C-alpha cells in the first residue's frame, strides 16, 4: 500500500519568511495529493491540492509542486503570517483503496511575529 | 450549515464501557470515513463506506463497529473501551474517488 513521509516535523520561521514542507510517496500510481491545515483543536481543512497531470499549482501565498518521477511533492508558503501557525498534513490517494487518503505525519509550523 | 457534523465533541468514559459516536453529512456525498488521530497528531484511516457499504477496514480491532443506516450517516460504536482508545476521532466524507475529504469537528475520546 501507499506510504507517505513528511519533513520536517517542526518548522519555525519569522513572519514574512517562506516555509517549505516536503513529502514523498511510495506508489507511483497515486494521482491525487491534497494538503490540509489543522489549527489547534480544530478539524483538518483542505488548503490546496494537486493532481498527477499537473506539476505546480498556486493559490495566493500557497503553492504546491509535484515531481512524479521522484515521487515527491512540496508545499510552499510565502510571506508567512502568525495565523499560518498550525499543523500541516500532506496526503496521497491510495490507488488500491476507494479514495483512501494516506496522510503524512504532519508538520507543526510556528510563525513568530 | 455544518457540512459534516459529529456528536459528541467530547466523551470521557471508563474502561470497559461501550460508547457510540454519531456522524452526519449534508453534502450528498457517497463516501464516508472514520479517521483516528492519536496524541502525536498522526491521522490514520479506520473505515470507509460507500453508499452504506463497507469498503475499507484498516485492521481495526473488532471492538470497533461502524454502522451506516443511510449514505448520509456513519456511526461508530466501540465496545469494551481501553485506555489506548483515547484519541480524537474524525468523521469525513467525499463525493467520489480522488477528491477532497471534508472533516467533521472531531470527537475527543478519553478513556479513564
Image (cartoon, grey):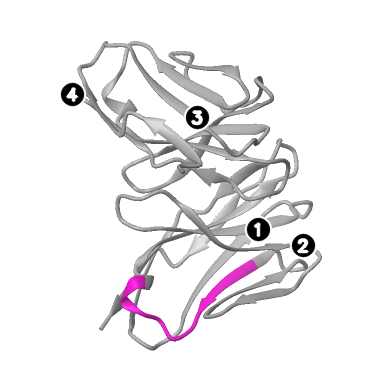
- Image-based side of B61 in relation to A65, left or right: left
Q: Secondary structure at mark 1?
A: strand
Q: Are marks 2 and 3 on the same chain?
A: no
* Relative vertical location of residue A66 with respect to residue B9 in this rendering, above or below: below
Mark 2 chain? A
* Residue under the point 31% across and 43% down: B39
Read off the residue under disc 3. Answer: B24
Q: Are marks 4 and 1 on the same chain?
A: no
Q: CA distance from mark 2 to mark 3?
A: 31 Å
Q: CA distance from mark 3 to mark 1?
A: 25 Å
* Relative vertical location of residue A15 with respect to residue A36 in this rendering, above or below: below
Mark 4 chain? B
Work out whether residue B16 or residue B24 is closer to the camera in this orientation and state it.
Answer: B24
Are the residues tagged 2 and 1 within 8 Å (C-beta)?
yes
Q: Residue B2: which quarter of the image? A: top left
Read off the residue under disc 4. Answer: B112
Q: Please tell me whether residue A81 belongs to the stretch shown in magenta.
A: yes
Q: Secondary structure at mark 3?
A: strand
Are the residues tagged 4 and 3 within 8 Å (C-beta)?
no
Magenta region, residue range? A73-83
* Residue under the point 62% across and 50% down: B100
Read off the residue under disc 2. Answer: A52
List x then y, in percent, for residue B10: 26, 32
Work out whether residue A28 or residue A95 is closer to the camera in this orientation and state it.
Answer: A95
Badge 1: residue crowd in 10 Å (few <14, some 14–19, many ≥20): many
Q: Earlier in the sequence, mark 2 or mark 1?
A: 1
Amino acid at each position: 500500500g501507499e506510504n507517505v513521509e513528511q519533513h520536517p516535523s517542526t518548522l519555525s520561521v519569522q513572519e514574512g519568511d517562506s516555509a517549505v514542507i516536503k513529502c514523498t510517496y511510495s506508489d507511483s500510481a497515486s494521482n491525487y495529493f491534497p494538503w490540509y491545515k489543522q489549527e489547534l483543536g480544530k478539524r483538518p481543512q483542505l488548503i490546496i491540492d494537486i493532481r498527477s497531470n499537473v506539476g505546480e499549482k498556486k493559490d495566493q501565498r500557497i503553492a504546491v509542486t509535484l515531481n512524479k518521477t521522484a515521487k515527491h511533492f512540496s508545499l510552499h508558503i510565502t510571506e508567512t503570517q502568525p495565523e499560518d501557525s498550525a499543523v500541516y498534513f500532506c496526503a496521497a490517494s491510495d490507488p488500491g483503496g476507494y479514495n483512501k487518503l494516506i496522510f503524512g505525519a504532519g508538520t507543526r509550523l510556528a510563525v513568530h511575529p | 450549515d455544518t457540512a459534516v457534523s459529529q456528536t459528541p465533541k467530547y466523551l470521557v468514559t471508563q474502561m470497559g464501557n461501550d460508547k457510540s459516536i454519531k456522524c452526519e453529512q449534508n453534502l450528498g456525498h457517497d463516501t464516508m470515513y472514520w479517521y483516528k488521530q492519536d496524541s502525536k497528531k498522526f491521522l490514520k484511516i479506520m473505515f470507509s463506506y460507500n453508499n452504506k457499504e463497507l469498503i475499507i477496514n484498516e485492521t481495526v480491532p473488532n471492538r470497533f463497529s461502524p454502522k451506516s443506516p443511510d449514505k448520509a450517516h456513519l456511526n461508530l460504536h466501540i465496545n469494551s473501551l481501553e485506555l489506548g482508545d483515547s484519541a480524537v476521532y474524525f468523521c469525513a466524507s467525499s463525493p467520489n474517488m480522488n477528491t477532497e475529504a471534508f472533516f467533521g469537528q472531531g470527537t475527543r475520546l478519553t478513556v479513564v
